[in-house]
Amino acid sequence: MIKISYATAIFVFCIGLYTILSKRNLFKTVIGLTIMESGALMLIVTAGYVHGGVPPLIPMEGQAVNPLPHAFTLTAIVIGASDVALALALVIKVHRRYKTVDLDKIRGLKE
Amino acid sequence: MILTLAVIFPLSSAFVIPLLHLYGSRGLRLFLPIMGLGAFVLTLAAAASGFGDYALAFFGGWPARLGVVFVADGLSSVFLALAAFGCGASFLYFYEQMGTGPWRFYVIFFLLQASMNGVLLTGDLFNMFVFYEIFSLAAYLLVSYSLTWQAVEAGLKYLVMGTVGAFFILLGAAYAFIATKTLNMAALAASFPQMPKATLIVIAACMVVGFSLKAGAFPFHFWLPDAHSSAITAVSALLSGVVVKVSIYSLIRVSLLFFGDALPSVFDVITVLGVLSLLGGHLMASRQQDIKRLLAYSTVAQIGYIMIGVGMGTATGIAAAVFHSFNHMLMKSGLFITAGRLAEEIKTRNIQDMKGLYYHRRGMVLAFTVLAAAIVGVPPLNGFMSKWYLVVASVEKRSFLAALALVFGTVISASYYIRVLSVFYTPGEGSSEHESRRPVLAIAALFSACCVVLGLLPFFTPIWELFVEVGSKALNTKDYIAAVLLK
Amino acid sequence: MGLLLLCLGIGWWLWKGVAAMEDPEFIIGPAAYYIINTAEETGAANIVAAILFDYRGIDTLGEASVIYTTVCGVAMLFSKSKYKRSSAGLSFIARRGVSFLVPFLLLYGSAIILMGHMTPGGGFQGGAVFATVTILLCIVFGSSFEMSRIKPKTKETIESLGGLFFVFLGGVGLLAGAGFLANTAAGFPRGQVGNFLSAGAIPLLNIAVGMKVGAGLSTIFYSMVRVLELEFGEQMSEVEGNDKN
């Protein structure tokens, strides 16, 4: 069961990579960054799963899941969000200059 | 305690500066030089503490397998010294040029320095990722600092490619966590040889791709020329001199600790990437008409040299790579400072417009000449010394293709640097006799002098043996694991 | 098309790396230690909060610095807007509704921050709720209203003070000789697990992080909205100019 979760996380990561590499619209590139990060984080969180586990809070009834991936994910989400915020700020500035966010038109305007 | 302070002091300086700016700007003028000097001194002290034995600092009092640990050994010491000098030079250049007015620059600068010290010192894989992201974000911001359209686009390109690299590193760390359920580097190094082969290949590839994207090796270097040429001079010197070296340090550390025994073919891949960067960088540089882009492509090529040294995997190879990193910081920071100041004063970056500069700005052009000779590899300057040791290391390992590429690359680099120098020395029309201001001239002269001194030192002192000892210590993973885990 | 095949090929090769590992039946490594020993050593009921703020506190400091860098950078990128124009905000019903909601939202955010060592939550989540309150005010009432209530300088001060408070709490541990960011080893009272006043320095660290994150995210949004309203104002005046001609 856990293997399906791994497969989904890898699939999401690759979709994000494809979006960054192939889309011409700058906003879609930024969305691709978010998707890629979500895929990598899903992989980490899945690694902590234990069959029949309960959340790691102290009045525990049973086996707790691994709390370490939760800590990593919290940190990595904040880092990814900051990257995306900065990317969006730069895209806004590019838009103010060229009045478009289409990468082909921007390249055309530069020549 | 010194190791902790080397990261915490610049970090708290970055937090204090906005308060000083809002509630007493005269305090800013007093405290900024103190903060810069303090960061410089603390980084050098951390470097000195790691030179003999391993120096450790445990955070929160928890042992290494539970918490985060900072480790300083010979490899970190050399790179810390490199970071101290590079950051110090950029700080002085910017402070002399702009004063204490632009306080946001100083905030981002101190965050950059704190996080670079963190990456160089940390002994935990996820902590390295966190500090890596801090200094990457600071680097993206510094590139777009001047807010020209060129700089903003270069910053965006750098951001997208750098973040993709960061996510590959995160993926590699995730795979390492899934396999061993721990993230301490020493504990990982102990359990890597027992991992299944397919997982090892995935982790190795993700890490190499991620670090090469951040360092600017050949197939992934497309952000480097734009970013390093559109930035202001202080930032270009900082990026080319120091920031790419931190990615190289991480590559060395990860490949030696994790893949030294388990997957030696990683080193061949690194060598191939190094040869490609070398040839690609030199060939592209010889076609450039813009002086800062030329220097940026030259950085790509020199990163190739360093990666060839790393890919040898022997103590001599690592020692040569580390020596060349230090020399390259001196040479490239000096080149960017001199060329950048000349380009700012003449208001153009085109090489052909710089005819006859020698007759108007003697000091700067002389410094540029010495530094260019060093980077090409004229004996007995330090560039020649480190390239010689690189060739020795690759011949020792019977890798004649790499040695041939090194020599061929030196010839090409000589050709384009001679082209630039010939433009500087031809008599031409131009402005009046005018010398740059004292502090900038002093920094450039200092770097040129260091190049000469470091070139002559191997003949008189056992400095090369020091580097070889650093290299062989870095290869000795068992000592590292024992020192960290058994405290 | 070729690019899609390349990405799917990378995915298949990544999958082979994962499939080669088998899942263990029980937890190994430091996580087992954390689950067993958190209650006695730190006094926190939330194990994830104990990991984030006690065992690996330096990661959290790094994460807070990432937000700090981004905030400083975004403010720097948009610092040169020429004049301030405010948007009109939404209708009367929306304004009244949000005015009812804001106190409850503030209470909710404070609860998340202060009880981070007992229930899931903590500084980051609570700070995000505070930032959401300021964003709602910006959208519903117009950005000049929000700016007049909470000035940008106040937000910068809160953010820097939060960061300095975090480093100060870590410094207490350093001075006590137990290492930076030490919790019970540095003398912070451990308390009874499950009480409100327990877990040593963890509630204080949560407050520091909450201040920093709330002020930071709010500043990012405000800087971006100012720029977009500026552009919208320019376009509107262009349209009005065309209408007149």
Image (cartoon, coloured by chain):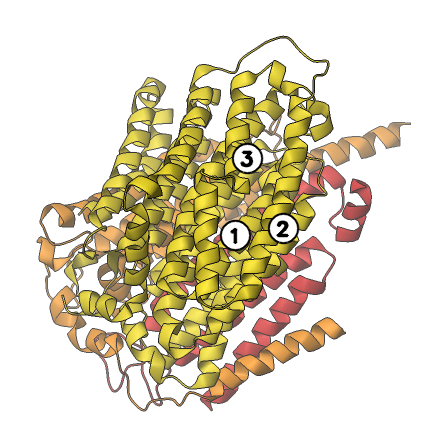
Chain colours: A red, B yellow, C orange
Which sits earlier in the primary sequence, circle 3 or circle 2?
2
SS category of the residue bearing label 3: helix
Task: State whether discs 3 and 1 lie on one chain.
Answer: yes
Q: Amino acid at mark 2?
A: Gly
Q: Which residue is mark 2?
A: B281
What residue is shown at x 63% (from left), y 72% (from top)? A15
Q: Residues within 10 Å of mark 2 (few under 14, many from 20)?
A: many
What residue is shown at x 65% (from left), y 78% (from top)? C8
Q: Residues within 10 Å of mark 1 (few under 14, many from 20)?
A: many
Which sits earlier in the primary sequence, circle 3 or circle 1?
1
Which sits earlier in the primary sequence, circle 1 or circle 2?
2
- CA gap, disc 3 and disc 1: 16 Å
As rendered, which of A24 and C199 lies closer to the eye? A24
Seen from this angle, which residue lies furthest top? Answer: B432
Q: Tell me whether circle 1 and circle 2 mark residues in contact (CB < 8 Å).
A: yes
Q: Which residue is mark 1?
A: B303
Q: Amino acid at mark 3?
A: Ala
The answer to whether residue B66 is seen in the rendering is no
Q: Which residue is mark 3?
A: B372
Q: Tell me whether circle 3 and circle 2 mark residues in contact (CB < 8 Å).
A: no
Q: Which mark is residue C154?
A: none
As rendered, which of A51 and B211 lies closer to the eye? B211
| Residue C2, above or below B33 | below
Q: Chain of mark 3?
A: B
Percent across and percent down for residue B385 are: 43, 45
As rendered, which of B377 and B442 lies closer to the eye? B377
Seen from this angle, which residue lies furthest right? Answer: C245
Q: Amino acid at mark 1?
A: Ile
